[in-house]
Amino acid sequence: MLVKQIKPDEWFLALPVPNIDNKMPVGNSDIQLLVDKLIAYNSRNKTHYYISQAIPFCSYNPEKIRQVAFGAESCGPRSILVIDPFGNIKPCYSISEKLGNIFEDSIEDCWNKNFAKDMRKNKTLPRECKECHYISECLGGCRFSAWLSTGRYDGKDPLMNEKFLQKNDSYWQAKIENVVEAGGAMVAAEYDAILQEIIRKASCNLLVFGLGQDSKLWREANENGLTVFIEDKVKWMQDLPDAPAYKVKYQTLLDKKWEDNPIIDFPEWLKDYNWEIVIVDAPHGYKQDMPGRLSTIKKAAELCKKGTIFVHDMNRENEKDFTAKFLGKQFMAIERLGVWTRG
């Protein structure tokens, strides 16, 4: 009756707490199912449900998890302390470490104990977490689960995805350097901007106009997502036979700049998806007898209603004119890379 009277807008769900007999009562597949269902439910209803406990963002899709969970911010002793039936003040319900006793110590003294301060300063996190893009929100998952599994508070939460953790900033910077050295069309800063957006959106729908030295980089960064390439050069199709690429033919020419002819053999099924990231780095457009990017920039605008569009070679007048018409004049520039955020 009280709940009906209050009509709360938000509910917080408590997951099963790990214990000695069952150190991992919730698995990664459970997290995936729960997160997807919560996102779907919240999108349809005014009342929203969220996960109250700390779960590592890398346990599934970080961008999805952050929509329905708040990391370890609500876990003690970042924002709370707990008093047990005997008056003992602890960091949380599960951690046995005592910070003091309510009958003998002040709350302020307990709050400022080294153990509590170390947790707030992320000193009790594994190295991999400290190098992660999501550290400020995720905060490393549950420290009690880590202790239960490893015997250490700075151990890894068992829900952490080892593969995700291994790919830190140093890993990706090395990948970018390799692509640049191999003759990639962009400079490191441009690659880094696109890479960070792909990693941020994690397992998204990624459409790339143009195969090249960077194609493997995009696929790896968007692992478990949908990555599709559109290419008009047979050579690149042959050099990268494993890439999910479609061969097309462009009918535009820069000497007839605004003559808008459709792309031949463009896959119609792509229209059924919202492409969260689109990279336009093809076809060639540095001479008048080349197709230019009128049709690919227009297609990017059609297929990405909510997401990010990257257009390379924005130092050229044709790219400026085409993007102004289909994407708008306001954009962020990184070297020769233009970035538009839509929706």
Image: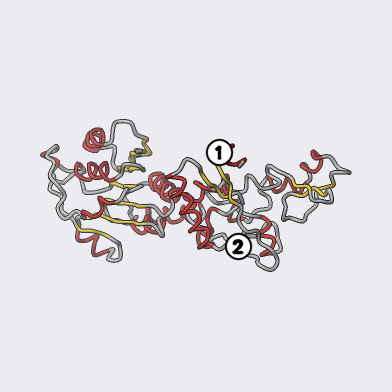
Q: Nearer the viewer, residue 177 or 205?
A: 205
Residues tagged 2 and 1 counted as in contact (Cβ below 8 A): no
Observer-side mark, 2 or 1, equals: 1
Residue 7, label in figure: 1
Q: Nearer the viewer, residue 340 or 101?
A: 101
Question: Mark 1 Cα within 10 Å, few/some/many (few <14, many 20+)?
Answer: few
How is the model colour-coded?
A: secondary structure
Question: Splitting the image into 4 quarters, where does residue 322 fall?
Answer: top left
Q: CA distance from mark 2 to mark 1?
A: 36 Å
Mark 2 or 1, nearer chain start:
1
Residue 285, percent from left and from top: 20, 44
Residue 329, percent from left and from top: 29, 31
Question: Splitting the image into 4 quarters, where does residue 317 fall?
Answer: top left
Question: Splitting the image into 4 quarters, where does residue 338 fall?
Answer: top left
Element under disc 2 = loop
Q: Could you tell whether 73 is left or right of 322 in the image?
A: right
- Furthest-right residue in view? 104
Residue drawn at (16%, 46%) of the image: 291
Name the residue carrying label 2: 158
